[in-house]
Image (tube, helix red, strand yellow):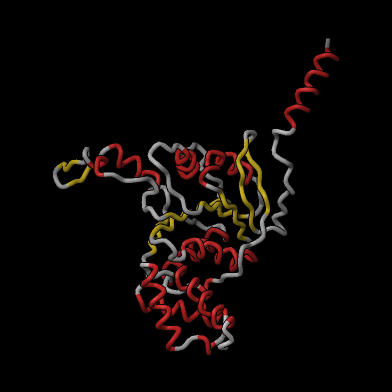
Amino acid sequence: MDAQLSQRLLDLLERADHWLPPTPEPVDWERDIAALWQRHALGGQLLPVAVRDAVTLDDLLGIERQKQTLLDNTRAFLRGLPANHALLWGARGSGKSSLVRALLNSLAEEGLRLIQVDRHDLAGLPFLVQQLRDQTHRFVVYCDDLSFEGSDDAYKALKSVLDGTLTGPPENVLLYATSNRRHLLPESLSDNEATRLVGDELHHGDAVEEKISLSDRFGLWLAFHPFNQSAYLETCEHWVRHLGDASDWNVAAREEAIRFATLRGGRSGRAAWQFACQWVGQQRLDGRC
């Protein structure tokens, strides 16, 4: 009977084998500085990835206060000092994600390691954090372009890890998130129907409190706003010179940069990079430089 049971279990495992995720290459944190977290039915796995680009903090213009604040917070964390989870929110293309990548490029030699988690994999975040608890390295777990719909329960896992469990996140893990929404969840007029004034105090309704309670768990909020024309043109000039040379930035380039932003309906660091790619590429293609 035991032999038959063992054989049946082996047959079952063979049939289920193709449903299991492939065994990934193990992450070597001495060598790898970044990884992706992918959730699956048995928990999740870390996949080492190469750094996307070589963007540095000096490449990011127009966000000096945000750069310095996040740099100071991250350096304190790397040195074992108190530091806050950070929410970078605001206008699209204003440098939120680029700032996190630039931090990794700048601080990897100081011990920073980055793990990116997709919003759809947040349910496995507690499992990931437990895996990192006994590691000797220090990790920023990073959620890019984070937002939730009203019926999406994935935010509960994030809320729990941030500040909702008995143990909390380990001291070698910080969470950084970027979002276009300050409170990460959609806000509607109906949410404020239960808000009331009691004396001089404003008391939010339960719906508003639920939404604020998630973003409120991030101790550091950094706001990113659309560029004014001066900051936009300064960024255009930087990237044109970076991709080409000093002669590529001239009166014609400045006028075209303004036209480019007008057609796109906004100024941002992303728009400046895209303009520089178009302008320098076209100059070289036409043989003008």
- The residue lying toward the viewer, choosing from 171 and 33, is 33
Viewer-proximal residue, 81 or 50? 50
**Residue drawn at (64%, 53%), measured in percent from left and top?**
35
Say if 9 sits above or below 231 in the image.
Answer: above
Residue 95, percent from left and from top: 46, 65
In the image, 161: left or right of 131? Answer: left
Query: On screen, 167 above or below 200?
Result: above
At horizontal 42% and vertical 56% (from top left) the residue drawn is 220
How many discs mark residues in the rendered view? 0
Instruction: Identify the residue at the far top of this view.
Output: 1
Looking at the picture, does residue 83 appear above or below residue 247?
above
Residue 56: image location, x then y, percent: 56, 71
In the rendered image, the residue lying farthest to the right is 3
State the image coordinates of residue 132 (x, y, percent, origin top left): 62, 46
Q: Residue at x 63, y 64 (%)?
A: 108
Does 251 appear above or below 38? below
Which of the image's four quarters has the C terminus?
A: bottom right
Say left or right for 151 vs 14: left
Q: Nearer the viewer, residue 213 or 266?
A: 266
* Image position, residue 54 (x, y; %): 61, 69
Most extreme residue toward the front is 286
Where's the N terminus, which quadrant? Answer: top right
Is 91 or 143 nearer to us in this picture?
Answer: 91
Q: Measuring 28% from the left and 44% from the top, which residue is drawn there?
A: 188
